């Protein structure tokens, strides 16, 4: 049962409780609000209010667009997201990339009123802890994007944001960490649904904040605590003949039947991790639930966003860049040396490519084949006997020449043109925790066996070799490996934007992108001020206290 089915009625019910939920809600006094004195009278009231809070979870399938802010992806339709203008470097105050207090307002309303309800204290404490985690998550997202923001901890009918000066980014981050610390002790290790906050989810968010702020020891400690909660990477126990239907023998040199089985098991384990039939598996710490066949509002839509019109009936909204494709290692676990753009274009030969073109895709990291559709790639599960081709210039066709395969579910393609992907979206999974631990532990104290072991778990699941500890034997060398492992393992999941800012490499990687045939797909530029976004002008108009902080950011 998908919890979001229960949510479907909530927008109507919660309007009576909280009134409008639009971005400017802070400035408006609800005209049809039920008095808190008449609402908080039963356990069902509390559950309705709690479920209403979960409408504002700080993650969704939109995270796929966030990779388009970076060198991982290109989002070609500016009306779908802000990714196109952000990656192009045309960022200004006309843009609003999530500056909203609607969720925080609802969280504050819940926390300020739930004690009125006749509910067992243990349950009440857990529910309050869940909402405090959601509020901390919201403030973390605001602070990491905008820097200083108003810190509002209580509900008010008045639009209090208009009169509040922004609190420093450091203080907002400290508040979020403090809230998470207090909440963790009162949360279950496993919640009733994986779309609800658990101890593991709260610890993961705490680890994210520490990692973003380069608090290495604290990030490693939080991640390590999760590593003791029983989560495991999803891995198929065995493979079937159907799992081996795609013939990769023309791309991969199998030294033995054992190596062949290892390859297919790794490919299918990583690929099927994201399928509907395996959702809520042992790797998923928290997910956003969607309803298949439910059109736009309650369905995932990831198939539509990722697949191409000629292969899956999608829109090619979010497509991999050449830089993303180049990032995948060789089958031996070594850095890949890509051909020059001119050489690639000549080999591709406007689609009439020969064997030399396919050399670029021979013996690569298994996750490349599970994640990227490139010309020549087979995928029988989506369309029988499909060999992917790039129909340049066609409707809903990639501008880079590549499409994402990762996270799509071939059991429900987008052939009908409908936004109805069946699968949930994992917003926190155990692979992220292992990568967080590895990075933070290496930065804090340098290489040790626990770091190699954490990364090796991820690589072995994908059918890749373990790290050669005699070669990767220094902090800088291990840092480079961890960063690239993080990039390819979490590709398309929305982590790269935070990563390149944390590592200070945005100016190096935010370059113009070109397609397979070396034509310009998008011109890009980077300025140091882009490290934080501007407040939207509408927010400054409501709250003049933001003006000075806006100028300090360089906007």
Image (cartoon, grey):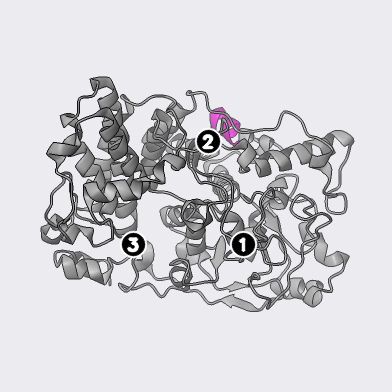
* Residue nearest the viewer, comparing 180 with 60: 60
Residue 184 image point, x, y percent? 33, 28
Q: Which residue is drawn at 36% across and 41% down?
A: 210
Vertical side of 75 occupied by 432: above or below: above
How packed mark 3 is, by other alpha carbons closer than 10 Å (few <14, some 14-19, many 20 or more), is some
* Residue nearest the viewer, comparing 276 with 465: 276
Residue 397 image point, x, y percent? 66, 71
Mark 2 element type:
strand
Vertical side of 263 occupied by 545: above or below: below
Q: Name the residue under label 1.
A: 320
Vertical side of 256 occupied by 402: above or below: below
Residue 532, which numbered label? 3
Residue 87 image point, x, y percent? 47, 69
Q: Most prominent secondary structure in the magenta stretch?
A: helix
Provide the residue span drawn in magenta.
Answer: 448-455
Mark 1 element type:
strand
Say which label, 3 or 2, has the lower sequence index. 2
Quadrant showing the C terminus: bottom left
Q: Which of marks 1 and 2 is in front?
A: 2
Residue 433 image point, x, y percent? 49, 36
Say which label, 1 or 2, has the lower sequence index. 2
How packed mark 2 is, by other alpha carbons closer than 10 Å (few <14, some 14-19, many 20 or more), is many
Cβ–Cβ under 8 Å for marks 3 and 2: no
Taking the image as shown, residue 46 lies to the left or right of residue 383, namely: left
Mark 3 element type:
loop
Q: Which of marks 3 and 2 is in front?
A: 2
Q: Name the residue under label 2.
A: 284
Cβ–Cβ under 8 Å for marks 1 and 2: no
Q: Residue at x 52, y 64 (%)?
A: 509
């Amino acid at each position: 049962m998908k919890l979001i089915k229960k949510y479907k009625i909530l927008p109507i019910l919660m309007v009576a409780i909280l009134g409008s939920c639009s971005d400017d809600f802070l400035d408006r006094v609800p005209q049809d609000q039920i008095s808190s004195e008449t609402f908080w009278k039963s356990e069902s009231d509390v559950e309705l209010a709690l479920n209403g809070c979960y409408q504002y979870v700080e993650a969704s399938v939109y995270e796929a667009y966030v990779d388009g802010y970076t060198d991982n992806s290109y989002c070609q339709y500016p009306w779908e997201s802000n990714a196109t203008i952000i990656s192009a470097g045309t960022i200004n105050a006309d843009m609003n990339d999530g500056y909203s207090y609607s969720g925080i307002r609802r969280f504050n309303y819940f926390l300020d009123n739930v004690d009125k309800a006749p509910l067992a204290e243990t349950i009440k404490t857990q529910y309050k802890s869940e909402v405090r985690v959601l509020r901390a998550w919201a403030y973390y997202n605001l602070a990491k994007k905008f820097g200083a923001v108003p810190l509002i901890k209580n509900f008010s009918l008045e639009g209090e944001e208009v009169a509040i000066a922004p609190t420093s980014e450091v203080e907002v981050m400290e508040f979020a960490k403090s809230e998470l610390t207090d909440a963790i002790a009162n949360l279950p290790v496993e919640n009733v649904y994986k779309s609800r906050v658990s101890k593991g989810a709260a610890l993961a968010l705490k680890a994210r904040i520490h990692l973003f702020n380069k608090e290495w020891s604290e990030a490693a400690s939080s991640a390590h605590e999760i590593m003791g909660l029983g989560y495991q990477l999803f891995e198929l126990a065995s493979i079937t003949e159907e799992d081996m239907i795609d013939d990769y023998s023309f791309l991969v040199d199998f030294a033995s039947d054992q190596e062949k089985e290892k390859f297919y098991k790794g490919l299918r384990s990583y690929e099927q991790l994201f399928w509907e039939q395996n959702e809520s598996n042992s790797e998923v710490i928290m997910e956003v639930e969607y309803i298949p066949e439910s059109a736009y509002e309650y369905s995932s839509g990831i198939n539509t966003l990722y697949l191409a019109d000629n292969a899956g009936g999608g829109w090619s909204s979010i497509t991999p860049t050449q830089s993303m494709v180049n990032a995948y290692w060789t089958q031996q676990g070594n850095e890949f040396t890509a051909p020059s753009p001119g050489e690639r274009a000549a080999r591709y030969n406007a689609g009439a490519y020969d064997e030399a073109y396919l050399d670029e895709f021979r013996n690569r990291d298994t996750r490349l084949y599970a994640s990227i559709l490139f010309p020549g790639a087979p995928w029988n599960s989506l369309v029988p006997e499909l060999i992917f081709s790039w129909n340049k210039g066609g409707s809903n066709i990639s501008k880079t020449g590549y499409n994402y395969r990762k996270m799509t579910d071939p059991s429900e393609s987008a052939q009908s043109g409908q936004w109805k992907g069946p699968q949930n979206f994992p917003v926190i999974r155990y692979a992220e925790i292992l990568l967080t631990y590895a990075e933070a532990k290496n930065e804090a104290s340098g290489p040790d066996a626990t770091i190699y072991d954490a990364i090796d778990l991820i690589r072995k699941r994908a059918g890749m070799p373990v790290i050669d500890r005699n070669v990767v034997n220094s902090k800088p060398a291990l840092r480079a490996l961890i960063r690239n492992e993080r990039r390819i393992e979490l590709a398309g999941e929305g982590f790269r934007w935070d990563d390149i800012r944390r590592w200070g490499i945005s100016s190096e990687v935010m370059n113009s992108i070109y397609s397979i045939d070396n034509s310009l797909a998008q011109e890009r530029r980077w300025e140091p001020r882009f490290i934080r976004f501007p407040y939207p002008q509408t927010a400054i108009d409501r709250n003049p206290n933001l003006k000075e902080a806006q100028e300090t950011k360089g906007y």
